[in-house]
Amino acid sequence: MKPAPFAYVRADTAADAIALIDEDPDAKFLAGGQSLLTLMNLRLARPARVVDIGGLGELNRVFDDADSVLVGATVRHRAFETDPLLRRLVPLAADAARHIGHVAIRNQGTLGGTLAHADPAAELPLVMVTLGATMYAESRRRGRRAIPAQDFFVSHYTSELEPDELLTWVRIPTLLPREGWGFVEYARRHGDFAIAGAAAVVGLRPDGTVERVRAGLLNVGDRPLLVSGGASMSGCRPDDELWRDLAGEWVRQANPPENADYVRDVARAALTRALRAAYDRAVSAGGE
Amino acid sequence: MDHVSVRMTVNGVLVERQVPARTSLADFVRDELGLTGTHLGCEHGVCGACAVLVDGSSVRSCLMLAAQASGAEVTTVEGLPHSGRTARLRDAMSRHHGLQCGFCTSGFLITATELLTDADAVEAPDEGTVREVLSGNVCRCTGYQGIVRAVLEVAGGGATAPSGGEPAARGGGPGAAATAGQQR
Ligand SMILES: Cc1cc2nc3c(=O)[nH]c(=O)nc-3n(C[C@H](O)[C@H](O)[C@H](O)COP(=O)(O)OP(=O)(O)OC[C@H]3O[C@@H](n4cnc5c(N)ncnc54)[C@H](O)[C@@H]3O)c2cc1C
Ligand code: FES
Ligand code: FES
């Protein structure tokens, strides 16, 4: 037995979970447990009580909502890889989710858990920032509120969520017709947290030239980093060299805490490939 | 207050116990039920020795509370069938020298069973897929080659699927393998 003693209560509904956490400031939500239980086993976390939300069926659902998809907080990482609707609507997340730990971790870990845990090396937070998702949180005290992904991640392991707030749903914009995506990361071994990684979305005009580019980096600082500015690709049909130059410019916005030059080099390689993959997919999706 | 009552089916048998809330599923099957085939290596999710199936999906039993598994159907290595693919896998593991000390073996059997009995798989997993799926299990003895060969033999594939193929879909319903690389 590894964790310090605690009391366990299973929430039957989201409303129940919110009420239970409101009663007890020393309680913590337990979703998949793939981060919290490791911390508790190491006694880095010692909640007096855990409120188990992992089995909440009402949040283990996905809704196709025209230009966005609404994904519940208890949807497993694995579902991004295997659920046909999610794969079709957020292929970037399907690609990214494959890099999270191993199958057994992904069978248990939840979307709400990885977002609330806010590890700067985590894949799905970067996907949410890159796609411009919105998180919905609910608590007794504050009611419901919507938090844009870009404001949600505050620092290492720190999100905008207050301790009594339940992350309920995430609204993820789906890709437009002439958009393509790319996700690339480098880790020492498959399933390890990445040294650095990148996600990108490239959108084309009807004539096949670039209209917009959105990209972000993981594990280059204290939270997922959306990069922007730099040479405009608008109206271009960039070749590999142009993408590499843009990636080189963009990774300068990153300030990795350790081995900065090396991490930036790795991030640049990942970003170059993610941008190219996104562009190629946009082209074959009918940009031209 | 710190005790919980848990009730689950383990290897086909309904069990009910009062345990401290902090009891992991691993400690529950080992200490409460005496099913010591499930091993504990790292106890923080890294080594895979403790893998069991919960409602058909592999999980780390060191990172799941017994209380979380209450109501579920759990299969440990002792409960894997003695016929069909799992039997062939056991046989292939010994022929290919897929085990030496055996500490990791139950975890590998669970992980490989999930892969090999994937109802939604469209094609036999190729070597890349097998290696990717097994990468969550650590073996300190064999060097992995024999384990990979054994799983590939039972998968019946090896050369069929294109390289770089993604792990086949599970639990996603029919047609789950559709869309990587395409627009909607
Ligand atoms: C060996 C191993 C390798 C891993 N590798 C990776 C990796 O490569 N990439 C990666 O991204 N992750 C990795 N993970 C972590 C994994 O993705 C976790 O599943 C995830 O970080 C947490 O999700 P969870 O559902 O397990 O949350 P839990 O561990 O249950 O909870 C994590 C935190 O979030 C809070 N929380 C959970 N749900 C909610 C909610 N709905 N509302 C408010 N707060 C909530 C909890 O209170 C807790 O503080 C790895 C884990 C392990 C054990
Ligand atoms: S003991 Fe559970 S993963 Fe190592
Ligand atoms: S056989 Fe000894 S650890 Fe794998």
Image: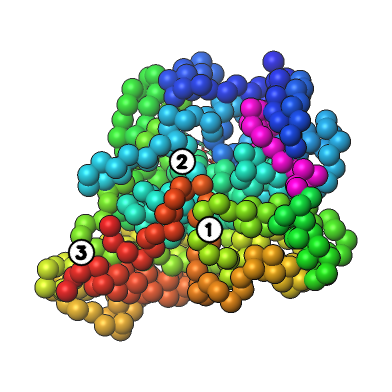
Disc 1 versus disc 3: distance between alpha carbons?
30 Å
The three-letter code of the residue at mark 1 reads: Ala
Give the numbered dot on residue B121. Answer: 1
Disc 3 versus disc 2: distance between alpha carbons?
28 Å
Of mark 3 and mark 2, the one earlier in the sequence is 2
Front-lying residue, A281 or A111: A281
The three-letter code of the residue at mark 2 reads: Val
Q: Residues within 10 Å of mark 1 (few under 14, many from 20)?
A: some
Which residue position holds label 2? Answer: A75
Q: Residue at x 70, y 45 (%)?
A: B52
Which residue position holds label 3? Answer: A178
Q: Residue at x 34, y 34 (%)?
A: A136
Q: Chain of mark 3?
A: A
Q: Chain of mark 1?
A: B
Left or right placement of residue A182 versus residue A208 in this view: right
Question: In the image, which residues are magenta?
Answer: B64-81
Q: Quadrant of residue A41?
A: top right
Front-lying residue, A273 or A77: A77
Q: Is residue B159 visible?
A: yes
| Residue farthest front in this picture | B84
| Residue farthest left in this picture | A207
